[in-house]
Image: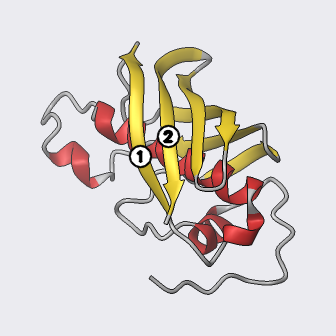
Amino acid sequence: MERTVSEEHQWEPPIDIRGILELLPHRYPFILVDRIMEFEKGKSIVGLKNVSMGEPFFQGHFPGEPVMPGVLIMEGMAQTGGLLAYLSAPEMIGEKLVYFAGLDKVRFRRVVRPGDQLIFRLELIRQKTRLTKMTGRAYVDDQLAAEAELMATFS
């Protein structure tokens, strides 16, 4: 998949949705991170997702009791982790895709509902040439909503 990446970006936070769309191949309705608030190259990233009742998945999960599917919380975390991988290895931006390679130690701690703001906090454990391992946590109102160890690979 060919993507055009602007040469003018310094990729300093905050990175809004336009910058995220330059970096990630995902598009609506599957882009699950809206903004990068903090980033430290080779170390950590903080992203956010504003959860709206307009999200298509709420139509069926669950009618009358909308709850964000846990797998989509993990996907938002993975997309934020992909941004950490790209921004820590800028030579890969526009050249390689970051693929989600694995999840370990996944735990869901609270439900996420329309109107919530998810904050994704990821820390790099290890980054080799093509493989990145990180820990991730998702918060709503400073309460832990989910956590996992993630692996991603460039391809």
Give how far across and how far down residue 15 sits, in percent: 73, 59
Could you tell me if residue 55 is visible in this image? yes
Residue at numbered disc 2: 151
Which residue reaches farthest front? 129
Q: 150 and 80: which one is in front?
A: 150
Residue at numbered disc 1: 101
Q: Quadrant of residue 106?
A: top left
Q: How crowded is mark 2: few (under 14 residues within 10 Å), some or many (20 or more)?
A: many
* Residue type at numbered disc 1: Ala
Give how far across and how far down residue 57 sits, in percent: 23, 48
Give how far across and how far down residue 49 sits, in percent: 53, 44
Q: Residue drawn 62% across and 17% down?
A: 142
Q: 126 and 147: which one is in front?
A: 126
Q: 2 and 9: which one is in front?
A: 2
Q: Quadrant of residue 30?
A: bottom left
Above or below, 132 relative to 146: below
Q: 92 and 110: which one is in front?
A: 92
Q: Is mark 2 on a helix, strand or loop?
A: strand
The N terminus lies in quadrant:
bottom left
Q: Residue drawn 33% across and 53% down?
A: 54
Q: Residue drawn 82% across and 47% down?
A: 41
**Of callouts 1 and 2, the N-terminal one:** 1
Q: Is mark 1 on a helix, strand or loop?
A: strand
Specify whether 97 is left or right of 114: right
Specify whether 127 is left or right of 116: right
CB within 8 Å, label 1 to label 2? yes
Above or below, 30 relative to 68: below
* Residue type at numbered disc 2: Met
Give how far across and how far down residue 81 sits, in percent: 58, 45
Above or below, 75 relative to 150: below
